[in-house]
Amino acid sequence: MPFQPVSRLEDLTLFNKLTEEEIRQILKTARQQHIQAGEFYFMQDDPAEAFYVLTKGKVRLTQFTADGQQILLRIIVPVTPFGAVALADHETYPVSAQAVEACTALVWGKTVLSQLLGRFPQMAVNAVKIMAEHVQEFQQRFTEIATQRVERRLARMILRLAHQTGVKTPRGVEVNLPLSRQDLAEMVGTTLYTVSRTLSQWESQGLIQAGRERILILHPHGLVKIAEEET
Amino acid sequence: MPFQPVSRLEDLTLFNKLTEEEIRQILKTARQQHIQAGEFYFMQDDPAEAFYVLTKGKVRLTQFTADGQQILLRIIVPVTPFGAVALADHETYPVSAQAVEACTALVWGKTVLSQLLGRFPQMAVNAVKIMAEHVQEFQQRFTEIATQRVERRLARMILRLAHQTGVKTPRGVEVNLPLSRQDLAEMVGTTLYTVSRTLSQWESQGLIQAGRERILILHPHGLVKIAEEET
DNA sequence: AGAAGACTTTGCGCCAAAGCAACTTACCAA
DNA sequence: TTGGTAAGTTGCTTTGGCGCAAAGTCTTCT
């Protein structure tokens, strides 16, 4: 599963095969940046000047289309890197990164970053791997949206989110993110109406319990079946 | 425009900021692999063991879904790298790479590759940039398919293909690829029927001339208008 | 507590596009 | 030349899901 968030910084793919000492040195070159809910780490089309690792809070990565529509590409939770395009020269951010709640992130500027890559070539290799995972995920999501029904795409997305941020409760797994119907719609490429209807249907089947910006999965296997069943 | 094919190997993004001498050394470590039309460089889910740069012919990158559907993600033309996931350890190919016609490619095995990345860290940075472009392209295509009508998506795709492989003829720009209606349908996420109908409509408007696995663009501006117009 | 604002649900009409079927056209190989 | 096959077209029917509108909830702030 790509982008499975890790709990310790040292477990990041980015630091793969580096020694504790090397990681410490790398971390020393980062600065911390706190922002409030609603603020942005960066905006789409800004020149990509820094690379981030979120350590606290939640960040939305969204993309605007030419005609003003918006889609939600992903939610970042600790500890996950984002803004990796900055690793490549002369790029602009393809997305905007907005804090959902108060956030803290480690930040490396572009120049520091290229020094680091020179000093620790393994880090560059790791970065390639991270990007490869991104490519795979979006190829996959593209294929999904091109071939699958909304219901299945939504089931898959909810399961994915549960993997990423799910917390176990006595009654089931709760997706620990404030996601509106609109947000979910943008993530799977549909409308808030269809999401609402689908969730209602699942609720009446006892698969989930849906609330305002809240989803509790009562019967994960049922969702998996919808996500994978033939036809 | 991402993945604009280049005519000289030295112009590849992968070799950015490397000296002619370094590039020569890197090229020396590649072997050549010829394959016939219909054969595969690799299949989806094979362990990713090599990285390729196509120097002759045309290659289709396709992805199968769990339920057997297929989609055509991209057509590779010379000189373009593919199979870049091999740069990351322990990955499998997310797509299959099939030759459309007799092909030649430069190949670097995984072990050689990691040695090269150690010796030339700039190459890893370049690889990150390439991957970043891939991510952007698929984010973009995901956004498109999620928000735009078939007609617009098809127009965009044809323009993209024309950029990649278009050849000028006295009557217009010809897309120099044997693409069936089915292929186009897979690329934009629709059905062959809808593609056929749309092309027929454009033909009757004098925008294009469509033949068997062949498209001639008579009036590019008309297509651009469809691709970009509001609503 | 009450009011305002944001989020959600659901009925209804509509349409873009899917999917089927029948037919035509182009290509290739014997 | 001729049949066989793959590619393409087009009419018809069906439908998933869009999107408006109106009503219903939950939250928050005063």
Image: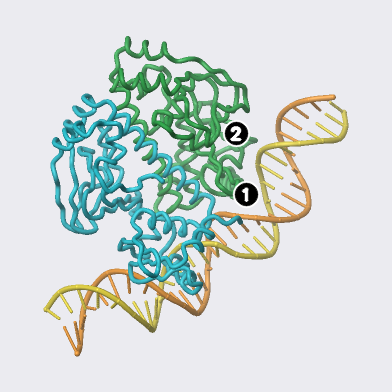
Chain colours: A cyan, B green, C orange, D yellow
The front one of B211 and A151 is A151
The front one of B114 and A41 is B114
The front one of A73 and A117 is A117
Look at 38% across and 41% down and name the residue there: A134
To which quarter of the image does residue A163 belong?
A: bottom left
To which quarter of the image does residue B127 belong?
A: top left
Instruction: State the image coordinates of residue A92 (x, y, percent, origin top left).
Output: 26, 38
Of pointers 2 and 1, the one earlier in the residue sequence: 1
Quadrant of the image containing the C terminus of chain A: bottom right
The disc placed on residue B214 is 2
Q: Chain of mark 2?
A: B
Label 2, residues with CA under 10 Å away: few <14, some 14-19, many ≥20: some
**Viewer-side label of 2, 1:** 1
Instruction: State the image coordinates of residue B114 (x, y, percent, origin top left).
Output: 37, 23
Answer left or right for A65 relative to D10.
left
Q: Is residue B193 above or below residue B54?
A: below
For disc 1, the marked residue is: B193
Q: Is residue A179 visible?
A: yes
Look at 50% across and 61% down and name the residue there: A221
Dot 1 amino acid type: Tyr
Q: Chain of mark 1?
A: B
Instruction: State the image coordinates of residue B172 (x, y, percent, origin top left).
Output: 52, 31
Look at 13% across and 41% down and name the residue there: A31
The disc placed on residue A46 is none
Q: Is residue B217 visible?
A: no
Dot 2 amino acid type: Arg
Disc 2 on helix, strand or loop?
A: strand
Answer left or right for B37 relative to A17.
right
Instruction: State the image coordinates of residue B221 (x, y, percent, origin top left).
Output: 44, 39
Q: Are marks 2 and 1 in contact (CB under 8 Å)?
A: no
Q: Is residue A184 above or below residue B74?
A: below
- Disc 2 and disc 1: Cα gap in Å? 16 Å
